[in-house]
Image (cartoon, rainbow, N blue to C red):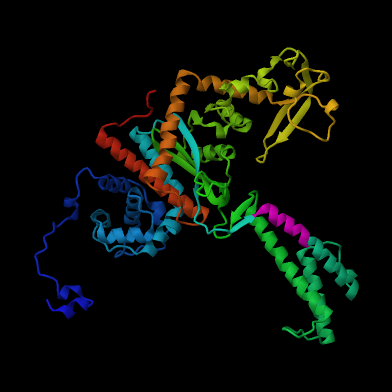
Amino acid sequence: MLTPNILRQNYTLFSRPYQLKLPLEIGHTIPDNDCVRLLGQFVEELDLSDLYSTYSRVKENQVSPRQMLKIMLYAYHEHNYSSRGIEKACRRDINYMYLLEGRSAPDHATIARFRSIHFGQVADKYLAMTARYLMDLGEISGREIFIDGTKIEANANKYTFVWKKSVTKNQVKLLEKTALLVQECVESYGLREIWHGQVKEKHLSKILRKLYKIKDEESIEFVHGSGCRKTQLQKHIELLEEYSARLKEYSRKLEVLGDRNSYSKTDPDATFMRMKEDAMLNGQLKPAYNLQLGVDSGYISWLTLSPKPTDTSTLIPFLTGMETALKHRYPVVVADAGYESEENYSYLEDRGISAMIKPANYEISKTRKYKQDISRRENMTYNPDGDYYTCRNGCRLYAHGIHHQKTASGYVRKQTVYRCYECAGCPHRAECLKGKNWKIPEEERFKKLTVSRKFERQRKECLDRITSEEGIQLRVNRSIQAEGAFALWKEDGAFRQFLCRGQANVYAESVLMAIAQNLDNLHRRIQNRKLGLHLYEV
C-alpha cells in the first residue's frame, strides 16, 4: 500500500481484499431467546392505527412508524435515550438492523420528531394497551396496585427560575409606581376625562395614545444619546411604555405559574422541587417533574406526571386517569404515608376501594418519646358519649366549635375544636402547652385540639388493615415492586434526567421507558419460568 493512499476520502482504495460472508438474513445471527424478538412480536400485535394517524403520509422507501416504534422501545430497553445515540446504534448494532428490516437507518432528527410529535400524541393509549395486553396474558393481576412517586430532574438550564412570590411582590410595587406616574401625567396634560383611577392595560394604552397625539400636535422631536436633553413629555412616554411592558411580562409569568409557586424559563412546565440527589448538601431546588408509577405484579400499568412536589394531591388524578384509560378499577390501593389525607381516604371509600395507606405517624408513634408526650391527643382518653378528652391532670377538653377547612381541590374538611377551661394552675402546663404565642399572655393560654372525627376513623381502619397478615404482605410487596421499578429506572438504567422539554414530550419519554421495562420484565420471566408471579411471600 502506498502511503499517500491513506489520506484519501475513499478508504476502500487501500483496503485488503477479502471475501465477506454474511447470511442472507440477519436474524439468523441473533439468538432465539433474545429480547429483541419478543419486542418485535409484541409491536406486531399492537393496533398502530392511532400512531399512523399522526402522519399526513408515510413514504414507502422510509422507515415506517411500526419500525420506528420497535427501534425506540429497544433503545430504551438498552438504556440508550439520546436520538444521536440511537442513530449510531441503527448503523452499527445488528439488533437494530434486524428491527429496521433492511431499511436505511433514520437520522437523529427523525428519531426526535417521532418521539415528541408523533408518539407523544398517543403515548397514553399505548401504555394502556400494553397494560391490557399483559392483563389478558395473566401477568397483571388487576387486584392490587402499588403506587409511589419520585422526582426526576427536567432538562432545564441553571438559574432560570421564576418565583411566584417574587413576581407578585414586584408587580405590586410596579403598580404603585405606575399609578403615581399616571396621576402625574393626568395632572400635567389634563387627561382626567380618560382616567378612571385604575391601572390597567387598556387605560395605559389610552393615555399613551393621548400623549403621542400631544407630541404630534406640538411637533416635539424625541432625542436619544448622551448630551441630549429629553423633554418631560418624552420622559413620561418612555416610562409609561417601560412600565406597561413590565406589567405585561408579570401577567404572562403569573399565567404560566397558575397554582404553582415556580417554573423554569427553559422548560415552563417544570417546577422547582427539592431533590434527593443533593450534591452540594445545601437543599438547592431544581426544576423537576413528579413521576407517579402504578405497579401491578412487577409491571407498570399506569403513570402520570405532576407539577406538584407533594404526593398527596396526585392520588385522585392518578386513579381517575387510570380507570378511564384501562377501563378497570383496582379494588386495593397500596401507597406510602405521603398519600394519606382525608380527601384521599374519602375518595377511595366512596368508590369501594380498600385503602392500604400507611399513616403518617406510623413510625414515630412507636417511639417512647411519642408515647410519653402528654400534649398529644393520642395519649389522652376520649369519651365518645360525652364527646370530650381527658388530659393527664384529669381535666376535660370539651367541644368548643366546628371549623371547616377547604383544600385547593375544593374538598371541605370538617374539624371539631376542643378546648380546656381548667389550664390555670395545672402542674403539667409547661409539658402540655408547647410553643410560644406572644400575642396571648401566658396566663390566658389554654389547651386546644383540632380533630377531624372522620379522618380519625379512616386512619384507624386503615391501620387495622395494614397491620393484618394481608396488609403486611402488601406493604412488603410495595417496597419490592414500586421501589424496585424506580431502581430499574434510576440505578440500572441511569435515567436521572429527562432529555426532552415540555410535559407532553417528557410524558412520551416516560411511557417509552415504562413499556420497554415491562417487556424486559416479561422477557426475564419467560426465560426464568416465573410467569404468573403476582405477589412475593413475606
Question: From the viewer's perspective, is residue 350 above or below residue 157?
Answer: above
Say left or right for 213 vs 309: right
Q: Residue 321: x, y in percent?
A: 52, 41
Going by the image, does 427 lie left or right of 280?
Answer: right
Q: Nearer the viewer, residue 197 or 475?
A: 475
Q: Residue at x 36, y 46 (%)?
A: 516
The magenta-colored residue range is: 163-174
Q: Quarter-wise, where is residue 65 in the image?
A: bottom left
Residue 57 visible within the image: no
361 up-or-down from 519: above or below: above
Q: Nearer the viewer, residue 169 or 350?
A: 169
Residue 408, picture quadrant: top right
Find residue 147 and report its horizontal and vertical position in percent.
49, 35
Q: How many marks?
A: 0
Residue 214 occupies which quadrant of the picture? Answer: bottom right
| Whether residue 79 is situated above or below residue 314 in the rendered picture | below
x%, y% of residue 452?
A: 69, 26
Residue at the image position 34 percent from the left and 56 percent from the top: 68
Q: Quadrant of the C terminus?
A: top left
Q: Residue at x 23, y 55 (%)?
A: 94
Q: Is residue 114 magenta?
A: no
**What is the chief secondary structure element of the magenta stretch?**
helix
User: Is residue 172 a member of the stretch shown in magenta?
Assistant: yes
Residue 40 image offset from top left, x and y in percent: 28, 48
In the image, taking residue 227 as reference, residue 482 lies left or right, namely left
437 and 537: which one is in front? 437
Quarter holding the N terminus is: bottom left
State the residue at coordinates (86%, 64%): 196
Q: Is residue 324 left or right of residue 350?
A: left
Residue 410 makes an appearance in the image: yes
